[in-house]
Image (cartoon, rainbow, N blue to C red):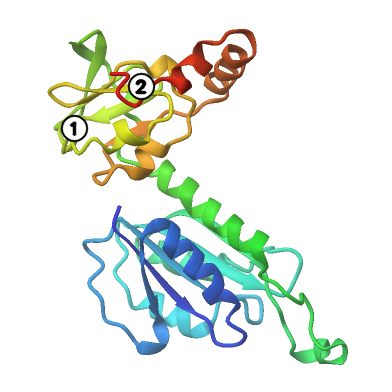
Amino acid sequence: MKTIIFYRSSYRGNTLKIAESMADALFAELVSIDSNPSIDLSDYDLIGFGSAINFAAHDIRLQRFVSSQNLKGKNVFVFSTRCRPFLGAYHSPLKKIIEAKGGIIVGEFSCQGFDRTGPWVLMDGYNKARPDERDIFKARLFVEKLRWKLHPLALAHKNPVAGYSDGIPIRHNGSNIVIGDKVVFLNTSTCIKCGKCINVCPMHIFSLKDTALPMDEKNCIQCRLCADNCPTFSIYIQESFLNGLRIALRESFSNKLQNNYKAEDNHH
């Protein structure tokens, strides 16, 4: 998923810390609007905009920059750092601009940041040491969930079964052929047979035949190592509470998962 993040961090570097964490998690391009960038956004799947909250809204320069962009049909998220303990409606002005430009808002994130302006000079600043490590972790978690939500196979499990391959259901997702039953889905049309999923899966659920097939998805523990390491984003794990409960029960009352975990790397 090709992603770009635009930000303005003009005071204490609060917003830059959050933007860097998000960019790292999304493998995204990170661009300061201070350089007045001119970038064609047509090839991007996800776009982020963020700044500090100044006078109950995002930085006015960021608002003007967003107003100059063509966002029609684009997935957009917004983020901010703020002094106040509650976000309230501070994101509303920027969100209205994005919607007016045709963007689709898919998420928003905010955290507190250090401020030493106005009355806070009397106490040498407010929100000292913020954003902290927890804020940065939460920012990363936010975009990781966002990336998972927008994964091209996120709704593949809802498509009707068109046939079977080695006992595994086959579904059509647009022009792509997807293999998977209820938990692990693999797009055989984009899979390049690199074998990374086989190497990183701790439960040895993949087998390499004509393509990599999730032969033992019942042993999947939802760690997502296969999906996170797939260079073509061809793997999706359908996470659910019921599947997590199934895993916990199997771990508690049988040794099947433990045995599979202990299996040799050449198990298949």
**Residue 15 as seen in the image, left or right of residue 28:** right
Residue 226: image x %, image y %? 36, 36
What residue is shown at x 43% (from left), y 29% (from top)? 202
**Residue 37 as seen in the image, left or right of residue 23:** left
Q: What element carries label 1?
A: loop
Residue 35's disc number: none
What residue is shown at x 36% (from left), y 38% (from top)? 227
**Residue 255 as seen in the image, left or right of residue 238:** right
Above or below residue 7? Residue 174 is above
Amino acid type, label 1: Gly
**Which numbered disc, 1 or 2, marks the residue that appears first in the sequence?**
1
**Residue 253 as seen in the image, left or right of residue 188:** right
Front residue (pair 263, 185) = 263
Residue 205's disc number: 2
Amino acid type, label 2: Ile
**Tag 1 residue:** 174
